[in-house]
Amino acid sequence: LKGDKVYLKKQDDYKNGDDIVIAIKNNILSVRRLYRYPKGIILQAINPKYPTINVNIVAGDMILGKVTAITREIK
């Protein structure tokens, strides 16, 4: 949601099922769940309003880090 804060940690490697922050089109940041398969990579949106992305390869510098925490202020 708007105003949420996402904390991340840069790693050398990411596993299937990791929630990651990734720079997608036009350097927009997105939180996605990573799934690697022999024929490609699936970047599943955490928010169901957004589509899943299927790609053949992800450049190492596109992944900014693994999500370690998300915080939200409740008013």
Image: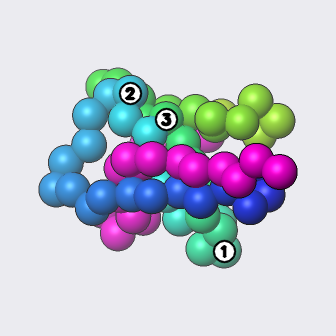
- In depth, the one of 55 and 49 nearer the eye is 49
x and y, in percent, of residue 74 in the image: 76, 47
Q: Are marks 3 and 2 in contact (CB under 8 Å)?
A: yes
Q: Residue at x 58, y 33 (%)?
A: 44
Residue on which disc 1 sits: 26
Q: Residue furthest bottom?
A: 26
Quick one: label 3 or label 1, which is nearer the N terminus? 1
Where does the magenta region start and end? Answer: 53-75
Check residue 72 for magenta coloring.
yes
Quick one: label 1 or label 2, which is nearer the N terminus? 2
Residue on which disc 3 sits: 33
x and y, in percent, of residue 25 in the image: 65, 66
x and y, in percent, of residue 6 in the image: 53, 56
Q: Residues within 10 Å of mark 2 (few under 14, many from 20)?
A: few
Residue on which disc 2 sits: 17
Q: Amino acid at mark 2?
A: Gly
Count of residue discs: 3
Q: Residues within 10 Å of mark 3 (few under 14, many from 20)?
A: many
* Residue 58 seen in this snapshot: no
Q: Residue at x 60, y 74 (%)?
A: 27
Q: Amino acid at mark 1?
A: Asn
Please name which of the two marks, 1 or 2, marks the residue nearer to the observer.
2
Q: Is residue 19 above or below residue 28?
A: above
